[in-house]
Image: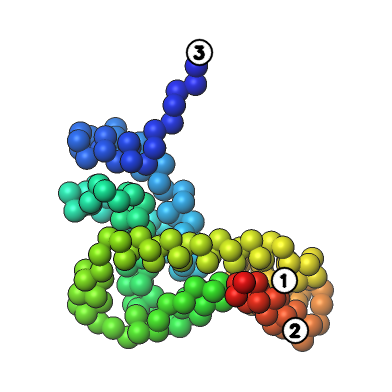
């Protein structure tokens, strides 16, 4: 029996828009959820929060699908919603950590977002065109994927330590204990590893 052809994002979204059925929604849901969840998790650095934001975003896919412009990829629209949800959480949390963590990956997010009212932020986001969001999403994901590649290509003496700091969000002291190295050595290797990544990101 020949293997059934996997539908594209566009085909799945078109099916859901036409039918508004739970079956077509779940087909689209199951396809987009893994990548969307990973994207959100890498922005907010909190698994539980990422699950909540993923659920909120995919709920809006059901309730606000009529606002989606089919000439763009469904993922562009969803990542825009997810990004706004993440920014809202960062602002509510009133912490610089997530903004700083994104900068460590080479993803620049203006601290303006952390101090802008929800109303003004909504106005700003609504002024952006779908093409603006597409360009921003593409640039952000390209930078993030490049950063991960550069981390993976680090020498072993840096790679595990950098992964623990930037990806696993571990404290310096915990990393030192895990790798059985002096705290200052850990700090030096993290500093050097970041410098190596930054140099590669500029190519």
Residue shown at 43% from the left, 31% from the top: 6
Sequence-first tag of 1 and 2:
1
Provide the residue designation for mark 2: 188
Who is closer to the viewer here, 119 or 128? 128
* 12 left or right of 103 in image: left
Residue shown at 26% from the left, 48% from the top: 71
From mark 3 to mark 1, how far is it between C-alphas? Answer: 48 Å
**Tag on residue 1?**
3
Provide the residue designation for mark 1: 161
Q: Secondary structure at mark 2?
A: helix
How many numbered marks have been drawn onto this rendered protein structure? 3
Residue extending farthest to the left is 66
Q: Tell me residue 173's x, y (percent).
A: 70, 80
* 35 left or right of 203 in image: left
Residue extending farthest to the top is 1
Sequence-first tag of 3 and 2:
3
From mark 3 to mark 2, how far is it between C-alphas? Answer: 58 Å
Sequence-first tag of 3 and 1:
3
The type of colouring in the image is: rainbow
């Amino acid at each position: 029996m020949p293997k059934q052809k996997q539908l594209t994002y566009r085909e799945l979204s078109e099916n859901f828009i036409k039918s508004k059925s739970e079956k077509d929604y779940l087909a689209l849901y199951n396809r987009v959820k893994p990548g969307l969840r990973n994207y959100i998790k890498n922005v907010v650095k909190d698994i539980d929060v990422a699950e909540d934001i993923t659920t909120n975003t995919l709920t809006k896919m059901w309730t606000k699908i009529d606002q989606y412009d089919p000439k763009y990829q469904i993922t562009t629209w969803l990542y825009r919603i997810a990004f706004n949800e993440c920014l809202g959480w960062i602002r509510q949390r009133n912490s610089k950590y997530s903004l700083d963590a994104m900068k460590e990956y080479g993803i620049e997010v203006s601290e303006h977002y952390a101090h802008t009212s929800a109303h003004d932020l909504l106005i700003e986001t609504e002024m952006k065109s779908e093409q603006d969001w597409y360009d921003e999403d593409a640039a952000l994901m390209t930078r993030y994927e490049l950063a991960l590649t550069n981390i993976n290509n680090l020498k072993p003496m840096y790679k595990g330590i950098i992964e623990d700091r930037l990806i696993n969000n571990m404290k310096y002291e915990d990393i030192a204990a895990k790798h059985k190295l002096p705290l200052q050595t850990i700090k030096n290797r993290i500093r050097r590893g970041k410098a190596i990544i930054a140099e590669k990101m500029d190519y």
